[in-house]
């Protein structure tokens, strides 16, 4: 199957996830600036989750730029990733509305962990299909950043129960680590042309 269908479907799912997430933001009951302060945890969790979704959308786009076609198991791996991403609005709302208490914060981290694992599976299946010498395989390499992210998520989940502020800092830190766009795929695509 040509990759265009999976890209279009995934883009639509990303758009729906972001729409659902923004609809969770509620207008304050009062009209004073101070009424907004009660919403800061919810807004902060929204911003962080929006950044994560943007990172996944960007990396997903780059991943599929480097391949020509997809097989059935890649479709399922992509759906697996989209499933975990679709839970982000729920855990975002729960963590924000409960001021980042331990259990919602740990569940937020668990969903991020599973998104990372699902993305890893998707990328490995694409590499398997296109070969170890493919542009994608050369671009991803050992994927140190991806593996570190999963490790940091595990640490943050545990930290959620004893040092919630550390868990939050780790989630922000992992997002910051991925904010710098990974240009390896683009560079390898240009050099192969």
Image (cartoon, grey):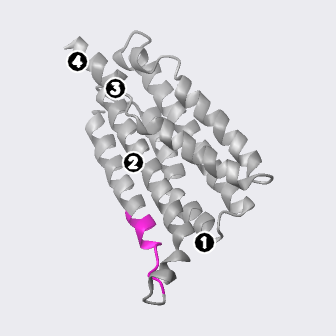
- Residue 13 position, x and y percent, is 38, 54
Residue where numbered disc 1 is placed: 97
Between tags 4 and 3, which lies in front? 3
Of 61 and 73, nearer the camera is: 61
Residue where numbered disc 4 is placed: 190
Q: Which residues are magenta?
A: 19-28
Q: Secondary structure at mark 2?
A: helix
Residue at mark 2 to residue at mark 4: CA–CA distance: 23 Å
Q: Secondary structure at mark 1?
A: helix
- Residue 169 position, x and y percent, is 62, 48
Q: Are marks 2 and 3 in contact (CB under 8 Å)?
A: no
Residue where numbered disc 2 is placed: 54
Mark positioned earlier in the residue sequence (4 or 1): 1
Q: Residue at x 75, y 47 (%)?
A: 159
Query: 72 above or below 134?
Result: below
Circle 1 residues within 10 Å: few <14, some 14–19, many ≥20: some
Residue where numbered disc 3 is placed: 183
Circle 2 residues within 10 Å: few <14, some 14–19, many ≥20: some
Query: 41 above or below 168?
Result: below
Mark positioned earlier in the residue sequence (2 or 4): 2
Q: Is residue 95 left or right of residue 33?
A: right
Q: Residue furthest left?
A: 193
Residue at mark 4 to residue at mark 3: CA–CA distance: 11 Å
Residue at mark 2 to residue at mark 3: CA–CA distance: 16 Å
Q: Are marks 4 and 3 in contact (CB under 8 Å)?
A: no
Q: Secondary structure at mark 4?
A: helix
């Amino acid at each position: 199957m040509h990759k265009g269908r999976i890209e279009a479907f995934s883009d639509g799912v990303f758009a729906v996830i972001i729409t659902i997430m923004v609809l969770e933001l509620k207008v304050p009951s009062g009209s004073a600036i101070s009424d907004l302060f009660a919403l800061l945890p919810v807004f902060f969790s929204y911003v962080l989750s929006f950044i994560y979704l943007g990172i996944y959308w960007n990396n997903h786009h780059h991943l599929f730029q480097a391949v020509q076609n997809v097989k059935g198991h890649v479709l399922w791996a992509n759906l697996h990733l989209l499933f975990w991403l679709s839970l982000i609005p729920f855990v975002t709302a729960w963590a924000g509305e409960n001021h980042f208490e331990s259990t919602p914060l740990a569940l937020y981290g668990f969903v991020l962990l599973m998104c990372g694992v699902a993305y890893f599976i998707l990328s490995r299946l694409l590499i398997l299909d296109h070969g170890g010498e493919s542009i994608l395989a050369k671009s991803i390499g050992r994927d140190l950043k991806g593996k570190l992210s999963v490790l940091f998520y595990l640490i943050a989940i545990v930290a959620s129960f004893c040092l919630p502020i550390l868990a939050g800092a780790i989630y922000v830190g992992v997002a910051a680590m991925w904010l710098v766009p990974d240009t390896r795929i683009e560079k390898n695509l240009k050099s192969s042309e």
